[in-house]
Image (cartoon, grey):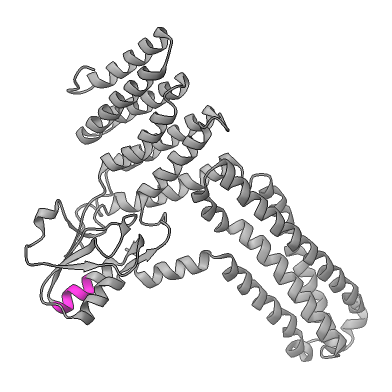
Amino acid sequence: MMSRWQWLLRQMVRQIWFRTTLFSVLAVLTALIAIWSKPLIPTDMPAKIGSDAVDNILGIIASSMLAVTTFSLSTMVSAYSAATSNVTPRATKLLIEDSTTQNALATFIGSFLYSLVAIIALATGLYGAEGRVVVFIVTIGVIVVIVVMLLRWINHLSRLGRVGETTDRVEAATRAAVEDRREAPCMRARELRDEGMIPSGARAIHAEAIGYVQHIDVKALSRIAKEGRSTVYVTALPGSFADPSRPLAWVEGSESEERIDEWRTAFSIADHRSFDQDPRFGFCVLSEIASRALSPAVNDPGTAIDVIGRGVRLLALWQEPPNADDEDDVTYERVYVPRIQLADIFEDFFSPIARDGAAMMEVSLRLLKGLRTLARLGDAEMLATAQVHARLAFKRADAVLTLDEEKERLAALAQEIMSIGRGTAL
């Protein structure tokens, strides 16, 4: 499991300013390196390669990169607005963290700063004839990088902010969280099967802020528990809404106020949910995409059907058994963490789509087919959960559809799902 500081570092690296700053510093250092490289250049080389042309080249780069950066920023804002309107605001964060977009902006701004610093150094005479050779060679390399990035950026712009591309990103982020949790259902800790396992004398750890739990540093919890010879029972998983009245965890053992603060800092709380340790959030965002597509203003059942297929694919992945090396691998003996309940994921994903798509035969049909697939592929828990939602989905559709033929078709499919295993009749 990732520690809190590793997680915070990952969040910082994903920010657009980080990569842009890194490229900018590198660009400035590249522009200044010619000052120290002058002694390495033969005195007759400047005349051979015509390094005097570097002034004009740097001027072109400086003016063009400023324009390209401005255009790219306006395009990004438009793409984010389109994703907010056509997909869901919760998916915009993934677009902001897109590495291709960040690399493009960082390259353009870095190239602008490189040319600006080089022009200033040339005007002050810091380079000399030999230094101009270094600047000329480096500038050719910068031009190659700019051309390659421009070609990638043009190709990327054709997809940025589109519904399909954004949905792909949400699925990928959800898949990563599902795989992590599938390999470590209890985050390498012992399983807290129910809150009845918590000793009566345990002390509650409350949050000081109101927001969502984004990350739990299970390693830190284990370290603190070992130091204090305590046992901690986590009750607020990532994605839970925390407030001062709801315990984040319970600790068995004598704990001072200073130690309580240490327990509390292992829980990262923010205003919004995060995809990293919260697979349910990914399913919620996918469900939001489908619900928005089914709204009268959008009326795009094809997107909803596409999202159902993605959800079924992710739930089938959730059903796969973990690797043999990871199964029952308990690293943190003094920490108890509950599993994510499969019924909660089904509720997050299928219920909103079944509600909003009940009046559309094609959506209800695809939804029941997806549930049938999960019922056949899953274990007893997934079978029972799929049957519950199949019954509810059919009832929703039956209440609003007008054609008897459509109702009969859905009823036959729902009955087929209920007959799998030891299902009961409708």
Residue span colored magenta: 222-228
Above or below 172: residue 58? below
Name the quadrant of the C terminus. top left
Left or right of 175 in this view: 383: left
Q: Position of residue 111 (x, y in %)?
A: 74, 70
Magenta residue check for 355: no
Residue extending farthest to the top is 405
Q: Is residue 398 above or below residue 242?
A: above
Image coordinates of residue 319 in percent, x first then y, are: 29, 40
- Location of residue 392 by image quarter: top left
Q: Position of residue 6 (x, y in %)?
A: 40, 70
Q: Residue furthest left?
A: 200
Pick the quarter of the image with the N terminus.
Answer: bottom left
- The quadrant in which residue 409 appears is top left
Q: Is residue 132 above or below residue 155?
A: below
Q: Residue at x 57, y 57 (%)?
A: 96
Q: Nearer the viewer, residue 385 or 322?
A: 385
